[in-house]
Amino acid sequence: MRTPVQTRSTSSSDRMLDATLELLAVGGLQAVTVAAVARRAETSNGSLYHRFGGRAGLLRAAQDRALTAIEQETAASFARADAEPDDARALRHLARSALEIFARHRGAMRAFLVEGQGDAALEARNERSSHLLATTVTRWLRDRFDASRPDAEAAWRLLFALGASQALFDDARVSPGSISGADFADAVARAVGAVVAGSR
């Protein structure tokens, strides 16, 4: 029995996007060429051009996939944290989740947030995603902790800066000392808690 054309097409597109994100993770934007993606996805250059129109379209689609995943994972984390009655545990859960999400999508974040600067289409999608995440975080902090708008915004910037630094730098480059992921996340949660406590 033949696979329906639509299923094959979707599967091929998914393989191309997966290959693009894998290449981004190991070599950044410069590693993503039509030939490299086609080779890794076991498809043809022509097939890639047909589905994405070229490298720019492929990068925009890969960025959308990565940022959508980050947005969805963040929303799911906030739903779980919101169900936690203890404020300190809820904050710890969120800090751990945020750092894990940034780390999991490290290659895409580095490529799109840093290397993608100067590309208006990539920058616009980055900004939409950042603003959506900011709205999610600040609204939750204001609702849950009665945080003021400035304190909630400051807490978001703290989370974003720490998460982005985790995505951009190996920990050994940040400090000669070491800290476990759990200890770091707990410290981040306490820092966010201290910021929003200033509103009370």
Image (cartoon, helix red, strand yellow):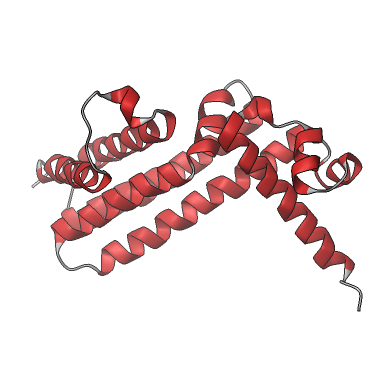
Is 124 located above or below residue 101 in the figure?
above
Q: Residue 84 at x, y = what percent?
A: 22, 67
> For the view shown, which residue lies furthest in the bottom direction?
1
- Residue lying at 37% horizontally and 48% vertically, measured from the top left: 100
Whether residue 112 appears in this view of the structure is yes
In this picture, residue 189 sits left or right of residue 45: left
In the picture, the quarter occupied by the N terminus is: bottom right
- Residue lying at 30% horizontally and 24% vertically, measured from the top left: 174
Q: Residue 66 or 172: which is nearer the viewer?
A: 172
Whether residue 124 appears in this view of the structure is no
Q: Residue 53 at x, y = what percent?
A: 84, 39
Q: Residue 16 or 118: which is nearer the viewer?
A: 16
Q: Residue 159 or 8: which is nearer the viewer?
A: 8
In this picture, residue 6 sits left or right of residue 33: right
- Residue lying at 50% horizontally and 43% vertically, measured from the top left: 129
Q: Residue 44 at x, y = what percent?
A: 88, 44
How many marks do you count on the picture? 0
- Residue lying at 77% horizontally and 60% vertically, measured from the top left: 10
Q: Quadrant of residue 175?
A: top left
Q: Residue 98 at x, y = what percent?
A: 35, 48
In this picture, residue 180 sits left or right of residue 48: left
